[in-house]
Amino acid sequence: MASIKIIKDKCVGCKLCVGSCPFGAIEMVDKKAVILENCTLCSICVESCKFDAIDFQKDEVSNAVDISLYKGVWIFAEQKNGEPESISYELLGVGRKLADDLKTSLFAIIIGDEIENATKKLIAYGADKVIMVEDKSLNYYNDESYTDIFVQLIKENNPEIILLGATAYGRSLAPKIASRINTGLTADCTKLEIDLEDGKLLQTRPAFGGNLMATIICPKHRPQMATVRHKVMKELEPDEKRLGEVIRPNVNIPTDLKIKVKDVVSTITESVSLTEADVIVSGGRGMGDPKNFELISELANVLGGAVGASRATVDAGWIGYSHQVGQTGQTVGPKVYFACGISGAIQHIAGMSSSDTIIAINKNPDAPIFKVATFGIVGDVLEILPLLIKEFKKA
Amino acid sequence: MNIIVCVKQVPATNEVKMNKETNTIIREGIEAIINPFDTYAIEEGVRIKEKTGGKTTVLSMGIPSVADLLKETLAVGIDEAVLLSDRTFAGADSLATSYALSKGIEHIGDYDLIVCGKQAMDGDTAQVGPGLAEKLGIPHTTYVRKIEEINDKYIRCQRMTEDGYDIIEMPLPAVITVVKEINEPRLPSLKGMMRAKRAVVTVLTAKDIGADSDLCGLKGSPTQVVKTFVPVHDVQSEMIEGEPEEQAEKLAKKLLSMQFNTSDSTEVI
Amino acid sequence: MNYYLTEEQQMIKELAAKIADEKVKPVAIKYDEEGTFPHDIVKILADSDLCGVYISEEYGGFGGGIFEMALVVEELSRACGGIALSFAASGLGAFPIILYGTKEHKEKYLPQIASGAKLAAFGLTEANAGSDAAGIQTTAVLDGDEYILNGTKQWITNGGEADIYTVIACTNRAKGARGFSAFIVEKGTPGFSFGKKENKMGIRASVTSELVFEDCRIPKENLLSKPGMGFIVAMKTLDRTRPGVAAQALGIAQGAFDEALKYSGERVQFDKPISSFQAIQHMLADMAIQIEAARCLVYQTCKLVDSGAKSISKESAMSKVFASDTAMKVTIDAVQVMGGYGYMKEYPVEKMMRDAKITQIYEGTNQIQRNVIALELIKEQKSGKKVN
């Protein structure tokens, strides 16, 4: 079994390891570090110790595979009504770079019905090959059939990397696949790169609500799987002239499914959904009254954006949960994010800090939202918003 | 109907602050809580049981002190608490966690529905629910925002998606992970708290549940953390001063010029 | 300070604190502005079993006393003194039954109050009978097996929302203070209606109404204790429940102090948090000292009351005077620490300042309380009894 212990003779009691432990699992006893039972063996402290006083014995991971047998970078191309979702292009963008660094091919996997047209777009956006599984029964995303098909494709082709969107479907499909084929999966990556020395995929993701970033590898298992946050990776300029191959593999389309998708309902009343929007106008407690959210909607309308909200306003019943931005709501990364009367609790900031430009309007100059804002206005949102709406209408 | 609710102990995250100078975590007054998302899972489990009868069991994997937190769930209507606690489980990633929990669930046995929170507040991965469903060989639905119907044969529920919801039907036993929208968790009652105080949490080891130690903990975890670092937010904040009219005008100008220069979707503004 | 609460008391305090922080705080400003009754919170309190903390287990309660009630009131008042009052006033209405009710009365009414299914209220005050309770005009006349009530009670907390009322009425004008009697009146009894709902400065989440009796007939079994005991019932009840008002004041003070302390650490002026300035530090220290002193007195008085001690008027009055004067001072200072922001409705301290004021006025003004204290002191001195 893996173990970690402090070598007492070497420990000088400097406490560096205590501060490094994200789990608070190291304590000082008689001027020596002691590892507590809530240690998760993450080994972050080993690096922090300047005196080599932490002895970490890790086990070889069991059930390792021969990683040399796995080739190719795959991305899962989500589509709706035969049209690739924007996350698919973003995955192709980052996948292209990884495939180039590994000198291998980039595959897009697309599953659905009437998806022929989508394959051209996927190639234009960077795919070398598109593996396409088309069937009437695959019209709607289904955890069971999509997993079955995906796993057949993996077993047949042995890809070394698979990227999926960290979307509602991607975050359901990826862990189901990973669990079935017993490989590692890193969620919600914000950065992916190849370790040029050994070809491993370095997967970086936020932890602890964005307070800490962790880089994760999957050394002995293949494929290396990751889900990628929407709006973080850049898509490539589409090139209609790019050449690529469309493969229609022979797979068993599962029938007699346990999981039945009875209906797919869209409740988005605005023209743009929160996660897709380039502009989000969000309101918080400082709006004072649910009626004043009309100002938020109006500005969002003028800018062709979506309406967001802080947790406090959702909890108070001013607006529906589907609008909630933040750790317990949706994570968004638009080009422009307006925080109107939002003080900026850490959970809210975790959900929107990757926005390109953040505008904060708040009465309280000490509000934490100003710390992440690109532009800040100290003032009454109820006074500023109508003026802003007027300005943008003029433009 | 027998329901198992899986929960995780997490640090109350808003207390996690980083010291940017020394690159260390400030852990003042940090408190361990039940993952807030899991409280919706607990409430949903209790509500289903109140309707259909049966038993609710809360299951967690963690250090021995998690038992005290599990007792809290007994104050809000959970009937029994089981904790998997063993050094063999330490260092588990989501795959090894899914495995251990699935063995725990098989050990408890006789279950119809497993309810998990959408994701844990500290890891945010949302992987364990689907992962353990797969290990148990049963169907799952994530992000459930409403249960439309449930009986001893099947469940029909609404899965939240980016632009609405899907209506999914699946036979039991099955796993669901729930989002905040599904309910409002009740507070404990005084009588529940008294009962919880006297209750005993069953603590099981890897051996007790017949888990293969090769598939547990660090050994059973394909992923490894190689580096952690504090993200640098080099935000250049610019405060826009002046009378409200001036402020609005200046801001609009800045945004308009910026958008036209940098964005390919100029139709946005 | 560690007050060495029992495990049960600790649990009650924790649960009440949880409700205060998670459920009451988010809606306190809303109810204050609307001046409506917090039915949702009352339901939460009922579900939590807290409504029965001061009622014996025999009648479905938790078996505690005034101390347990005070702990709940204190915690709720940290978030909203008005909402806490809805809970406390039910206790005030229940205590005459607890103290003087027959077995039948208790079996009929206490389980409903303990479960939170029904609220109680206490009707003593009238337009011309405030500090001088002997001025009560409401009459109760025995007619066969029934008493007929006529008159109007004023400023009755939970009036209209409660289902069970204990009402003091005059049964024999000639006997003066010995001519009053106490009755239980149920909502819905013909001839019993509710008058004007008051628009108050503070505690706006609590409802305050007139009780109007017009030839209201109640069974004579609804008499509490004996005819002529009404004044005693009222005074003994108030002596016991007064630490509850003190606890309300204490909670309001604590809530305001917490806000001011937090704000002083966040608010930066002259490049420093204002908590680094001695002027602010001394104010905070003084607030904390007074709150802790009030808590010591309130808790100790509760213990004295719960011990069954006979002579409690003086201590009960002292706890109420001290805690309510503290609440007033601390809330004023909290607004001062927070400056302009404190004065604004976006922050909760201006509301707390308004809420605090009533605690110096109701259940016996602080001036009347001082009279009581002084008279007790003089009496003790004359009788040669130890003053402390």
Image (cartoon, rainbow, N blue to C red):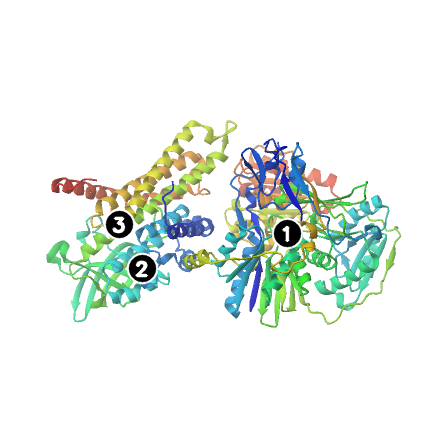
Q: Is residue C59 above or below residue C273?
A: below
Q: CA distance from mark 1 to mark 3?
A: 55 Å
Front one among C191 and B173: B173
Residue at mark 1: chain: B
Three-letter amino acid code at the position of disc 2: Ser
> Taking the image as drawn, is residue A379 in sight?
yes
Q: Which mark is residue B227?
A: none
Q: B132 left or right of A247?
A: left
SS category of the residue bearing label 1: helix
> Taking the image as drawn, is residue A326 in sight?
no
Where does the image place residue B90, in percent across and percent down from the top left?
63, 49
Three-letter amino acid code at the position of disc 1: Thr
Q: B252 left or right of A73?
A: left
Same chain? Circles 1 and 3: no
Q: Which mark is residue B88?
A: 1
Q: Residues within 10 Å of mark 2 (few under 14, many from 20)?
A: some
Mark closest to the chain's N terminus, 3 or 2 = 2
Q: Residues within 10 Å of mark 1 (few under 14, many from 20)?
A: many
Residue at mark 2: chain: C
| Residue at which label 2 appears | C56
Same chain? Circles 3 and 2: yes
Where does the image place residue A25, in percent across and percent down from the top left?
58, 42
Q: Residues within 10 Å of mark 3 (few under 14, many from 20)?
A: many
Where does the image place residue B189, in percent across and percent down from the top left?
43, 58
Front one among C242 and C356: C242
Same chain? Circles 2 and 1: no
SS category of the residue bearing label 3: helix
In front: label 1 or label 3: 1
Quarter of the image where the C terminus of chain A is located:
top right
| Residue at which label 3 appears | C305
Residue shown at the point (77%, 58%) measured from the top left: A83
Three-letter amino acid code at the position of disc 3: Val
